[in-house]
Image (cartoon, rainbow, N blue to C red):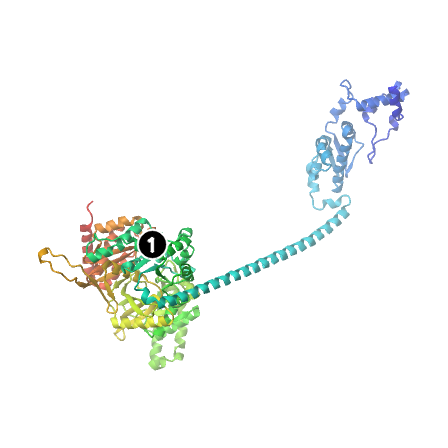
Amino acid sequence: MGSKKVVKRLPPFQKPSSTPSYTSKGSIAPPPSCISVISPKKSKAQSDPSICKQELVASAWLPKSPEVSMAKPVENVTLEFDIPVRQGVIDYESSSLLAFKQHCCLFWGSALSFLEHVANLLKDFAVPSAIIKGKKVVEILPDFELTQRSTREELLSVLKNYTTVKRMISRPGQRYKGQNGVQVAATKIQATWRCYQCRRAYITFRQQQWASGVIAISWLMHVHMGRVRKTLQESRQRHLENFFTRAKHLAANWNRIRTSRRTIIHIPSLGYSQQIREASPDFPIHQGSQLGRLCEIQDSNVDVIYICPVPASEELLQYYDKLLGLQAAVRSGNHKDIADLQDRFKILTPEAVYSFPNRPLSLATFLKYSPSTIKRIKALIQGREAYIVGGLLHQDDLAVADMLDVPILGPDPEVSHLYSSKSGSKRVFAAACVPVPPGQYDIYSRKQMLEVLSQLIIDYPEVKRWVFKLDHDYGGNGTAYCDVIAHLKCYPWVQKESQRYGPEMWQKKWAHEPALAKISQELPGLLAQHAQAVNEKRFPTWAKFLQTFVSQGGIIEAFPPSDSITGLTVDMLIEPSGEITMVSSGDQIHADGPLRSSGTTLPQASVETSVLNLLSLKIAEACKSRGVVGYFSIDFVTFIHPKTLGQQVWAIDLDLRYSDHLALTQVLLHVTNGMLDCRRSCFQVQLVPKKPKDRKKEQPQTAPIVSRYAVMSSSMRHVNLSFIYYNVFLQMCKAHGIGYDVQEKEGSIFTLFEDQKRHIFGMVTIGEHLQGALMTFARHLFIIYQELSAPNMHAETNFKEAVQDIEAILGVTEQNKMKFEEEQQQAAKTQSPPK
């Protein structure tokens, strides 16, 4: 029954010859295995078609028996199944394809689909011939059945001649030689053009989008900056209004405040521009070199808060504790009577200094961003009269004053910066009608500079050296000079021209035109070759100095036409009540060159006191009329004029700030308890009377009042000093007898600034006579130099220059100089400690 049902379901048998063959359209013929089984001889199966059908079905669905050996020869013969493809058409009649078809009859559909993919790829690229490896196709088929997609590389990997086909397919334009090449080329052209248009439109859109973003951000930033600028302007205007309000209150109550218990907040800030601050490598040290302000506690009604721009170590604090405690010992004449005055002075360092260690900011800026220090100052001055004494005032000084709610003893910052400049000081001197060097100010271009200098050379032929000064700088750092007459080749011709015209005609401007043309033509090369800056590290060439000179402006003035020149520094005070006082005056010492002051001798002895007082008072009145209040200093220069043979005094500089000279004067007054009368150029101290040996004959004795002279410097420099600690340095000086006698009020006092670099210090030497004070100062410097300098070491120092300048002041000859050096060496040997 079961066999009959099977026979009925099967189609009628057809002979192999009538079996449909495989066509290009993919029609499938019966498996070749069935054909190979049929024998050419007639058998029972031929007479009975149902039996053949059963055998065919059984051979297709049942596993092959190992006994059947008909498939084994086929597998061995067609192991690789190299299927040829010509012009993108598979040869379906090839034995390899038929064998491959028999081999993968169970998954022939997938294999055929893959082969057609390969054939289409070859036809697309017009590959003339290729051979497909059937074995490789079988390996790839599992992945192909899952994805029904294959990459070009996978399709090509089944080719036996892969390299040749790959090279052909990679040729540019090969795709357009294959099937539908024209349509594909047209499509490519259209797609490329559309892509180009879209890309161009996209790029334009992105550019516009970027531009709109930039415009939007710029506008937002502009609005924000405008808002911030407006806020700052309002804040600064508020600070300025509060400054003037407090200044009026200070002026109205000054007579009461200066005689009552008060606290002075010293902020020695230098509010210079960023360019000047960054050009000074030791800017924090320059700001912190006025620790002598602490000595204002000499007045029993004064407490001092000193803001230090560098961290003060315990060693430095202990030194100033002893120095400030000397006042009691000075009054009693016993060095053991040192008082403890720590409750009357405080040295504070803003915490912002630690946050910005390498930023040369002004001290007021550091304090502005130091809330802890501001809070502590408020606690110290709570319930007390207090005011600020600053340096060169800045907007941040006004902000600090607002935070502390205290007045400032000083001018408006704009006034301070205007008249502290070299050109501004010339305006003040012109208003005061005081003598000044020949020159010109407010120079802002190279052409103007050459024209002005050429005219000055013609107008003042006796001046050999001309000095160039930047408007905004300090300490002589922005100064250059040139001996123009010595190097001007056309100068003899100019002299002949002046003699030819005569004195009267030579004063006419038209007579100067040929000379001006020649001088102006020669000056640029002359200055480039012979002009020299005082600070050669900052301005190694004239071109660099000239660039800065033109950018910020400057002046040209004559150097005194004399070989013997003396500089003076006068410190003035315009009190808030309007009273003008000369608080200090001294003759300058030039250890770092003739255009840079490194110290002073006090009191001054180079100009008649009446002349100096008159000139200083005129300048102070001119400053007062311009709103200047507080401390300021004036620099003069005096010499014997070669034509008149009379003493000439010129006012050359004005600094509207508390000077280093005044800070050292405070140290001098503190350690001597002396009285300085600047109007008479007299410094006197009261000695402590010595107790008689016989107590029975003891009688009250009056303390003698004697004159004293001092040599002071705040810029003594020796690099090797940084190798030793201050305690060692002081012990070394003590071993050599360098110290201060509180009874005789003679000797040397040091002012130490910071203990990080430790290469700059201040020194005050006091003596009975000016010559003795100078000699002592030079001898002490020589001893320190011998101790600090190794035999084969060339350390950077200005000790030698200071000693040479002192020798020039004393008029020491070569013979006296050698004798003096021998005495110094002998003294150093006798005073050196035993080994």
Which amino acid, by three-letter code, is at mark 1? Ile
Q: Quadrant of the C terminus?
A: top left
Residue farthest to the front, as pictured: 383
Residue 750 in view, yes or no? yes
Residue 404 placed where, x, y %?
40, 59
Q: Nearer the viewer, residue 128 or 517?
A: 517
Q: Quadrant of the N terminus?
A: top right
Mark count: 1
Question: Which quadrant would residue 468 be assigned to in this image?
Answer: bottom left
Residue farthest to the bottom, as pictured: 504
Asked whether, in this view, residue 367 is left or right of residue 170, the answer is: left
Q: Residue at x 43, y 68 (%)?
A: 446
Residue farthest to the right, as pictured: 47
Asked whether, in this view, residue 765 is left or right of residue 127, the answer is: left
Residue 268 placed where, x, y %?
36, 59
Asked whether, in this view, residue 405 is left or right of residue 68, the answer is: left
Q: Nearer the viewer, residue 108 or 693?
A: 693
How crowded pointer 1 is (Cα within 10 Å; few <14, some 14-19, many 20+) is rated as: some
Element type where label 1 sits in the image: strand
Residue 45 placed where, x, y %?
88, 20
Q: Nearer the viewer, residue 343 or 819?
A: 343
Residue 511 placed where, x, y %?
39, 79
Question: Which quadrant would residue 107 be assigned to in this image?
Answer: top right
Asked whether, in this view, residue 241 is left or right of residue 829, the answer is: right
Residue 792 in view, yes or no? no
Q: Which residue is mark 1?
A: 347
Q: Nearer the viewer, residue 98 or 492?
A: 98
